[in-house]
Image (spheres, coloured by chain):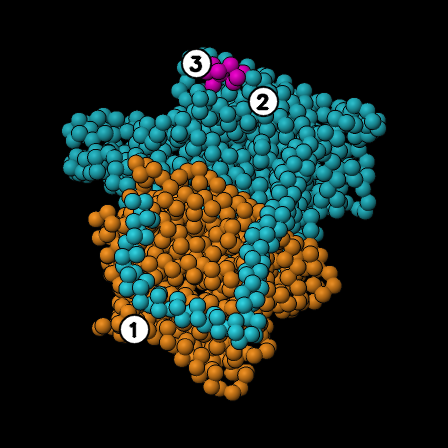
């Protein structure tokens, strides 16, 4: 290892902050320590973007430490373009999430921020792990603080929501654990991801690892990831979780946690079990494309603003899953590899774009809730008059969410639709309907919340203040900057996704 | 090389966008004067730049160009430089970039521009040079679609895909730029007074949106890649949405804005799918896999029949046309435009009459080679476009007759006139389409601004509460009448006559082309009939507004100069724009604007002799004049008083029913949208949510599984009854099981696994 241990630092900095925070007795220092730690983590993560060499395929910034050596596990880390961008998304969003609940959290303030910091460390760990056991460890650790954030600091029905969240995720995790154990045994009794991948590839080449076996393993992983995405029909935990979670929880949940699913598909299902992924692709891709329509129809029916945005996530991430798997639904003789890579690149880009736009939307709903103590669209109205800045920001976040050209969402959606079209035009046509329905449910929501006459309490709310703007502005700026200059990000995705697409042929 | 000024091409879009940013961020604080100066200054500056670009040479006719291999051209350059002068005029050859560099022509083909040389007068010299050096020499237009291009780098690149920030100014874009910034500037000036009642924040917001619109429109027009065009396409839609709902405190206005945006998005869905199909075709046609949605490249591939089968192109073009029906308010997506009148009137003039709504026409003209051969099942897509256009023209023209709101009359009239433009596009008469686009931009902007002046002076939009205004608002009266005459295509004195006439003549000629369908004559007939209806509703509007006695409340007054001066200028343009396209029988040359556009659009070759052509033109003019005159005279006669049977129909009578039908635009919006699509979607989404998502999946399956878990736990709890004997029993079972697992199963695991895997793999 001849470089500064950036990845280790990114995992341990938030943990260190959490320890410090639990040692300080004053409750009110919580937000400051957490914010400072997470901003520092973001600063430390920035050089990664330039240290990563987009010209070179494969994992970079690799490092390996002894850990549970006897059973073949190690503390090994590394990033490719996909995990690099998702790590940056995580470190970028955590400080913003902390700011989003700056005043919303009034009880056990310190514990709340400890949970957030532990969550950040675990999320970064999931993206950086190059060891199966380490990955699973972080994956499970991630669950605990999120569960607490919803269950302790959530709204009235927080317990039901957090139990539902937990059970869904735990069922998925259990299957994944079983599959991991199986992989461990057949993959050469090691948890090292690179070795396992090589061994499996060798077994596939030798015909020792057939499609049926792959389907089962891939399916076990896929279910865990489908729950996280969440893919229809295993999505119903999400609306509950979002409605009950405090703002910071919703922001992190939407912006980062949901991306674990897409990341898992890319990291495990596709490279380890290519034939299995091809077998399952029609189911997953059509569930995704169908989820675009289904999620949008659900969003149209909602009266709770947070639930509406939660269902919009189901719709948007359905398109992401369609983008990941559409290429594999093409018959081998019609398979277009570059198109498959484009769709996957679009999917990863869309995950980031969705993190920015939906993060901003939840941030703003939180701000509205703090003022009006309701998220019911019917009770809001005319907010643009008393709070023009809030309204402007919400409209901008909406535009980013409905993928107006010039925003990051457009780049992501366009690449997905193009890549999907190249391999499966009918699926692209279904997925593209999200364009219309997304505009419908978002604009109707904007119209009912911000326009019209402001009556009663709605007419007396305060506009966004400086603290809130400091947290929000980076999200909106990033959403537009990535829409206009996606080049450096796409460059970093290209080698990894080309290699993955080559598995599909 | 290009002239230096070409580097400023992207500024055409960036200047208005900068204006929007300044007004958006600072306008509220820095006050009205700042807002006005920035708001009006930005489009004015863009107009000046557009004018300067149009004055620079490339886009214009008149230059002689030599083209050939680099060696040949440099020989020619040397030869001409040695001559130095011809008839005392200096020769300064200028090398320039190949404007068609994407063509797979010999890579080293270069162009030499010869300013000051006349192709006719200096022909002996040119022939001599051509013979001696092997270059091709001719007027610039012989060398294909000359254009300025500025490439600001890559936007979206992945794999072979490379979408670039590329701005292209050719003749078509030039015309659009001048109209948008020119009419745009006048409307900005007008707005500075029309919107003065807004508070400081609203005033700044208005000009922010309006500048942003001009910027987005420029991106639409100048975008060299279909995807960049789409940026502008969606950008103008956004500004339209924001401006329709500008007075958002009235929920109805905000709803109209949402409706416009969502209906447009339905069209955009078609546009995007068509775009994806075209891009896939381009990828297939490009060895090496590099592709984009570069318009020039698409057109080139289509023109050389290398893009794809007519059927596939047909599907792509039909999808793109769906996009056009959204943006340009054609059947079946026209229903948003009348509702768009909820926006301030200058917005209606600029966005919903003069510029944005013509984007569909522009887009198809831009892609004319792609549309040229596209057909599905033997039906050419252009034919479909013409039929949809004429149906929309007729349908909306009749609907205009039933409106009381002066702005809704003009809105339906706009839908109808756009229909004419699509008829021209369908006949592949792009010159005529763009000519009508330009004249319509002038006279419809004029009509809307005049209507705005009337609304400003009376405080109402209902023509029932107007009347006799010619005495109170003389400037408005005269200019609006000129606009109405242009709309009616009143013979000879106004531009609208010539542009509409050209369209109808082209349709007739199209029918006369060998192998053409008889449907074209039907389109012609409906077009003429709609012309008469247009004249009728125009006359009705003028009569109800300006003649008779004033029927409203208060004292109407003429508008201030900042509003009337734009009216006068637009009235002048509405008359003299005729010069852009006088017919061949009057001038003995091809109409100017179509001639100017001819080298860059794919037209249908005429198979008629000039004599027949002239006869058709003549008969067309006579027929058109009769239709317009009949319409105007009938209108003036019928509405000489507002107390006629049309305005005050007998209750329950046929007239009242007909009127009701027309007032509601043939009930399309009510039936298809308000009682069809909207409730269906609402019902579907609620039922799905309530019964599928919530009841079945969440409560049924998920919580059901949970209940199974609860039952299970109930069952296991029954083991723990607190009796030591029972526990001892469990202990014994465990004591047996654990060693079995530890000693037998674990060591034998690999073998078991092989067995299991064999079973799993199906051996």
Q: Report the residue at 62% width, 43% height from top.
A: B684
Q: Chain of mark 3?
A: B
Horizontal and vertical percent for residue B170? 39, 38
Which residue was labeled with disc 2? B527
Q: Quadrant of residue B130?
A: top left
Disc 1 designates what residue? Answer: A68
Q: Chain of mark 1?
A: A
Residue A21 visible in the picture? yes
Image coordinates for residue B101, horizontal then vertical, percent:
28, 39
Q: Residue at x 19, y 35 (%)?
A: B69
Residue at numbered disc 3: B515
Relative depth, front residue between A214 and B322: A214
Q: Is disc 3 placed on a helix, strand or loop?
A: loop
Residue at (67, 33) in percent of width and height: B671
Q: Residue furthest right?
A: B651
Q: Are marks 3 and 1 on the same chain?
A: no
Instruction: Give the SS element for disc 1.
Output: loop
In the figure, the cyan chain has which letter?
Answer: B
């Amino acid at each position: 290892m001849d470089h500064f241990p950036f990845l280790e630092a990114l995992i341990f900095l938030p943990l260190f902050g959490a320890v410090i925070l639990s040692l300080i007795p004053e409750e009110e220092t919580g937000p400051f320590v957490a914010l400072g730690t997470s901003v520092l983590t973001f600063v430390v993560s920035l050089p990664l973007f330039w240290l990563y060499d987009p010209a070179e395929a494969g994992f970079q910034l690799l490092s390996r430490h002894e850990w549970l050596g006897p059973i073949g596990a190690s503390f090994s880390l590394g990033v490719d373009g996909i995990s690099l961008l998702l790590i940056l998304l995580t470190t970028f969003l955590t400080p913003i999430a902390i700011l989003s609940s700056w005043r919303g959290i009034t009880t056990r303030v310190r514990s709340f921020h400890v949970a957030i910091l532990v969550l950040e460390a675990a999320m970064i760990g999931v993206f950086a792990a190059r060891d199966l056991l380490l990955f699973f460890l972080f994956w499970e650790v991630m669950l605990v603080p999120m569960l607490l954030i919803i269950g302790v600091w959530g709204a009235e029905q927080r317990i039901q929501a957090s139990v539902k969240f937990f059970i869904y995720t735990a069922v998925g995790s259990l299957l994944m654990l079983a599959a991991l154990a199986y992989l461990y045994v057949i993959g050469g009794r090691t948890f090292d991801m690179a070795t396992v991948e090589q061994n499996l590839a060798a077994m596939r080449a030798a015909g020792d690892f057939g499609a049926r076996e792959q389907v089962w393993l891939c399916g076990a992983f896929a279910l865990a990831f489908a729950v996280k995405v969440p893919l229809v029909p295993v999505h119903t935990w999400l609306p509950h979780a979002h409605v009950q979670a405090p703002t910071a929880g919703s922001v992190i949940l939407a912006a980062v946690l949901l991306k674990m699913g897409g990341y898992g598909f890319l990291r495990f299902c596709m490279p380890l079990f290519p034939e299995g992924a091809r077998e399952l692709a029609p189911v997953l891709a059509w569930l995704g494309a169908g989820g675009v329509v289904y999620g949008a129809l659900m969003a149209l029916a909602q009266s709770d603003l947070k639930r509406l945005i939660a269902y919009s996530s189901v719709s948007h991430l359905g398109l992401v899953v369609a983008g990941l798997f559409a290429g594999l639904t093409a018959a081998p003789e019609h398979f277009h590899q570059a198109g498959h890579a484009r769709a996957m690149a679009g999917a990863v880009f869309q995950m980031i774009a969705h993190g920015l736009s939906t993060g901003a939307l939840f941030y703003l709903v939180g701000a509205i809730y703090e003022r009006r103590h309701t998220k019911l669209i019917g009770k809001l109205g005319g907010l643009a008059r008393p709070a023009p800045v809030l309204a402007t920001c919400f409209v901008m976040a909406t535009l980013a969410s409905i993928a107006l050209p010039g925003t990051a969402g457009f780049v992501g959606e366009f690449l997905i639709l193009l890549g999907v079209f190249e391999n499966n035009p009918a699926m692209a046509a279904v997925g593209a309907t999200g364009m219309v329905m997304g505009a419908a449910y978002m604009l109707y929501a904007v119209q009912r919340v911000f326009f019209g006459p402001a009556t009663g309490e709605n007419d007396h709310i305060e506009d966004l203040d400086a603290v809130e703007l400091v947290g929000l502005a980076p999200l909106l700026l990033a959403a537009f900057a990535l829409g206009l200059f996606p080049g450096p990000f796409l460059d970093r995705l290209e080698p990894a996704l080309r290699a993955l697409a080559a598995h599909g042929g | 090389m290009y002239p230096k000024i070409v580097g400023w091409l992207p500024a055409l879009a960036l200047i208005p966008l900068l204006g929007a940013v300044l007004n958006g961020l600072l306008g509220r604080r820095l006050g009205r004067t700042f807002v006005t100066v920035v708001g009006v200054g930005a489009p004015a500056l863009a107009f000046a730049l557009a004018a300067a670009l149009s004055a620079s040479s490339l886009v214009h006719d008149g230059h002689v160009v030599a083209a050939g291999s680099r060696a040949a051209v440099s020989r020619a350059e040397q030869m001409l430089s040695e001559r130095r002068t011809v008839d005392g005029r200096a020769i300064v050859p200028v090398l320039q970039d190949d404007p068609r560099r994407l063509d797979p022509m010999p890579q080293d083909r270069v162009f030499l521009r010869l300013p000051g040389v006349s192709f006719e007068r200096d022909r002996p010299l040119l022939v001599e040079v051509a013979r001696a050096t092997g270059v091709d020499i001719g007027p610039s237009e012989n060398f294909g679609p000359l254009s300025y291009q500025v490439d600001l780098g890559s936007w979206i690149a992945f794999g072979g895909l490379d979408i670039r920030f590329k701005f292209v100014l050719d003749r078509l874009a030039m015309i659009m730029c001048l109209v948008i910034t020119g009419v745009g500037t006048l409307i900005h000036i007008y707005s500075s007074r029309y919107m003065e009642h807004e508070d400081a924040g609203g005033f700044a917001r208005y000009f922010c949106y309006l500048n942003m619109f001009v910027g987005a429109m420029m991106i639409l027009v100048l975008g060299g890649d279909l995807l960049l065009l789409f940026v502008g396409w969606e950008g103008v839609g956004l500004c339209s949405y924001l401006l329709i709902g500008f007075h958002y405190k009235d929920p109805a206005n905000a709803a109209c804005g949402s409706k416009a945006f969502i209906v447009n998005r339905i069209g955009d869905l078609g546009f995007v799918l068509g775009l994806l199909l075209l891009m896939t075709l381009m990828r297939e046609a490009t060895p090496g896999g590099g592709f984009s949605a570069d318009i020039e490249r698409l057109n080139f591939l289509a023109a050389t029949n290398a893009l794809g089968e007519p059927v596939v192109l047909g599907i792509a073009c039909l999808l793109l046309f769906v996009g056009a029906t959204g943006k340009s308010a054609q059947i079946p997506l026209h229903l948003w435009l009348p509702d768009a009148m909820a926006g301030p009137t200058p917005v209606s003039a600029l966005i919903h009459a003069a510029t944005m709504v013509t984007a569909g026409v522009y887009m198809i003209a831009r892609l004319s080679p792609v549309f040229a051969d596209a057909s599905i099942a033997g039906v050419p897509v252009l034919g479909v476009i013409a039929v949809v256009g004429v149906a929309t023209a007729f349908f909306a023209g009749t609907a205009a007759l039933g409106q009381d709101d002066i702005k809704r009359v003009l809105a339906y009239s706009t839908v109808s006139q756009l229909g004419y433009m699509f008829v021209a596009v369908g006949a592949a008469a792009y010159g005529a389409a763009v000519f009508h686009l330009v004249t319509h931009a002038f006279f419809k902007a004029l009509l809307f601004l005049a209507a705005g002046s009337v609304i400003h002076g009376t405080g109402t939009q209902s023509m029932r509460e107007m009347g006799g205004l010619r005495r109170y608002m003389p400037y408005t009266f005269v200019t609006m009448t000129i606009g109405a005459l242009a709309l009616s295509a009143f013979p000879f004195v106004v531009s609208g006559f010539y542009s509409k006439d050209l369209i109808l003549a082209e349709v007739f000629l199209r029918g006369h082309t060998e192998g053409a369908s008889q449907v074209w004559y039907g389109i012609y007939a409906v077009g003429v009939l709609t012309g008469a209806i247009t004249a009728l509703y125009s006359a009705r509007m003028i009569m109800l507004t300006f003649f008779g006695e004033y029927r409203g409340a208060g004292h109407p007054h003429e508008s201030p100069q900042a509003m009337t001066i734009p009216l006068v200028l637009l009235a002048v343009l509405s008359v003299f724009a005729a010069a852009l396209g006088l017919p061949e029988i009057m001038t003995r040359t091809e109409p100017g604007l179509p001639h100017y556009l001819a080298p860059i659009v794919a037209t249908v070759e005429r198979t008629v002799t000039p004599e027949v052509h002239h006869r058709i033109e003549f008969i067309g003019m006579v027929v058109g004049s009769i239709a317009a005159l009949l319409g105007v005279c009938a209108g003036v006669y019928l509405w000489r008083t507002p107390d006629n049977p049309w305005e005050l129909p007998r209750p329950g009578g046929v007239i009242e029913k007909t009127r009701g039908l027309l007032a509601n635009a043939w009930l399309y919006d009510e039936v298809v949208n308000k009682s069809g699509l909207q409730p269906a979607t609402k019902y579907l989404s609620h039922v799905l949510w309530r019964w599928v998502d919530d009841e079945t999946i969440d409560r049924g399956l998920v919580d059901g599984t949970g209940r199974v878990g609860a039952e299970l736990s109930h069952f296991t709890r029954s083991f723990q009854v607190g009796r030591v004997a029972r526990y001892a029993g469990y202990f014994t079972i465990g004591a047996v099981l654990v060693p079995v697992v530890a000693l037998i199963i674990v060591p034998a695991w690999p073998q078991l696994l092989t067995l299991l895997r064999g079973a799993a793999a199906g051996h």
